Amino acid sequence: MAETIRREEASIIARELLACQRHLKKNNIFSCLVCFQEVLKKMLVTKMLPSDSAQLNKDINIFQHDLAASNVFRDVYGPVTFRDDDIPTALDFMKQLIEIKNEETQALLTEEADRSMAAETDDLNQIQQIKVLIEKGDYAAAQELFADKEEIISLLIDEYNTAGIEHRRAGRYEEAIRDFRRALVILPHDEGLYYNLARTFIDKGAWKEAAETIGGGLKINPDFTEGIKLLKYIREKGWTEA
């Protein structure tokens, strides 16, 4: 049996690559390399559509160029040239960079780690506050806390979306619906979240809710190909608007 391609896994890799870019912009070079190593590992083991693979490879090539050109990377590791479209070699190189143990590098990494740990502790405390507010239904207060904080938004979306996917696969549909809806509180204009929620309604047998949900995603992006296909599938299964 052919392995199922789950497009949401490609989306997760894309989000993690964005997290690498954020680390680089903040000069958190060690966190950036560890994050990028995980992206490369997932690229080697994740089955995806050729179009998704091509786009991710293109984005990875761009990121590698940005990484090599960054001052903080050059200060620590010197001039480096990455080869495009060669993920295994890039992954091996990331492992080597992470394992470097000279005193100068260790001093830089220790200082950065202290800053990162303090920042991550603050972020985790704020994330917990936001989650409590969302669970209580106090969405306005939650939105004030995460407004314009891209890293916190990304972490929350990853957590809720990943949990929703796991619940759906396990047949825990109400829990999946809850988590996808919580993700939409954080990012209400993400058609991919509507897609995941609609698929959960289909698995549950709630065809009307599925159609209404993917319809909401298509209002955000009328050219959303996977959403168009899903709505067509729902209609082929016999659901029509009253």
Image (cartoon, rainbow, N blue to C red):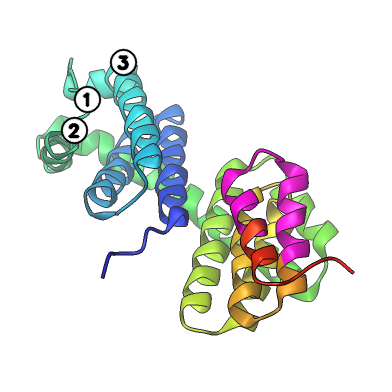
Q: Name the quadrant containing residue 216.
A: bottom right
- Residue 83 highlighted magenta (yes or no): no
Sequence-wise first label, 1 or 2: 1
Q: Name the quadrant containing residue 30.
A: top left
Magenta highlight: main SS:
helix
Range of residues picked out in magenta:
211-231
Sequence-wise first label, 3 or 1: 3
Amino acid beneath label 2? Thr
Quadrant of image for the C terminus: bottom right
The disc label shown at residue 105, or none: 2
The disc label shown at residue 76, or none: 1
* Numbered disc in front, either 3 or 1: 3
Judged left or right of residue 32, residue 12 is right
Q: Tell me the CA gap for discs 3 and 1.
A: 12 Å
Q: Tell me the CA gap for discs 1 and 2.
A: 6 Å
Q: Label 2's element?
A: helix
Pointer 1 with pointer 2, Cβ within 8 A: yes
Identify the residue under disc 3. Answer: 69
* Numbered disc in front, either 3 or 2: 3
Classed neighbour count for the residue bearing mark 3: other residues with Cα under 10 Å, few (<14), some (14–19), many (≥20):
some
